[in-house]
Amino acid sequence: MCNSDMKYFDELCRAMDFLARDERTLFLGQAVACPGTGMTNTLKNVPHEKLLEMPVTEELQMGMSTGLALTGLVPVTIYPRWNFLLLAVNQIVGHLDKLPDMSAGGYQPKVIIRTGIGSERPLHPQHQHVGDYTEAFRLMCKNIEVIRLDKPEDIFPAYQHALERTDGRSTLLVEHGDYYNEK
């Protein structure tokens, strides 16, 4: 479906509202329950009791997300920019991605990882905030699907797929910060 009226930011809000309706989901990260990033505004309709505000402890956050997934929850773990997600590589590549292999398929945690390519407009935040490591993560992770959300019409189906998938895989979804106001 291609609807020219779809807006990138609105589709993100619609996807978060959809995820929030599932009793298994919990949203965690920095600036999920408190203002702080553009992603915060996409969670405005998510019930407060589903939002777990985290300190700046990216690796701990991903470890918690994996643990929560092992209990049957579906964590939506939010890292506003790729450059922050890099601090959780050990947990993503060495643990979450490898659990299905290490357990011969016995453990298949489903985590929805949300990150973004930092916005450069109207103000460039400098190079440590605008990285795009999509291709590198596709190469490093064989059990985590990495999806870049380039168009508004990509967003809702990708998040729906991440929640409803039954193949035992986690999903890393990559948003574009500049598209929040441009598309």
Image (spheres, helix red, strand yellow):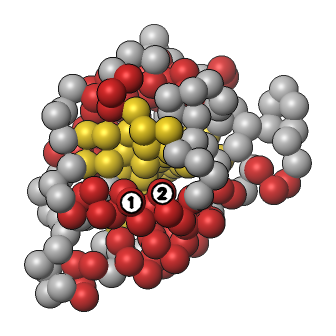
Q: Amino acid at mark 1?
A: Met
Q: In the rendered view, does 143 fall on the left or right side of 150?
A: left
Q: In the rendered view, does 175 fall on the left or right side of 67?
A: right
Q: Quadrant of the N terminus?
A: top left
Q: Examine the rendering and report whether any part of residue 13 can be seen.
A: yes
Q: Is residue 166 above or below residue 52?
A: below
Q: Amino acid at mark 2?
A: Gln
Q: Which residue is located at x 18 percent, y 85 percent? A: 103
Which corner quadrant of the image does residue 63 belong to?
bottom left
Residue 52 or residue 99, whichever sits in front: 52
Which corner quadrant of the image does residue 49 belong to?
top left
Please name the residue that numbered disc 2 is placed on: 61
Cβ atoms under marks 2 and 1 closer than 8 Å = yes
Per the rendering, the mark at residue 64 is 1
Q: Examine the rendering and report whether any part of residue 180 can be seen.
A: no
Q: In the rendered view, does 2 fall on the left or right side of 93?
A: left
Question: Residue placed farthest to the top in the image?
Answer: 5
- Rendered location of residue 26, percent (x, y): 31, 40
- Rendered location of residue 174, percent (x, y): 51, 48
Give SS at disc 1: helix
Alpha-carbon span between mark 2 and mark 1:
5 Å
Q: Is residue 102 above or below residue 97?
A: below
Residue 40 or residue 182, whichever sits in front: 40
Neighbour tally class for label 1: few under 14, some 14-19, many 20 plus, Cα within 10 Å? some
- Please give the count of numbered marks on the rendered protein: 2
Q: Which residue is located at x 45 percent, y 24 percent? A: 43
- Rendered location of residue 47, percent (x, y): 33, 21
Give SS at disc 2: helix
Q: Which residue is located at x 38 percent, y 16 percent? A: 45
Per the rendering, the mark at residue 3 is none
Q: Which residue is located at x 16 percent, y 34 percent? A: 23
Q: Is residue 178 above or below residue 161?
A: above
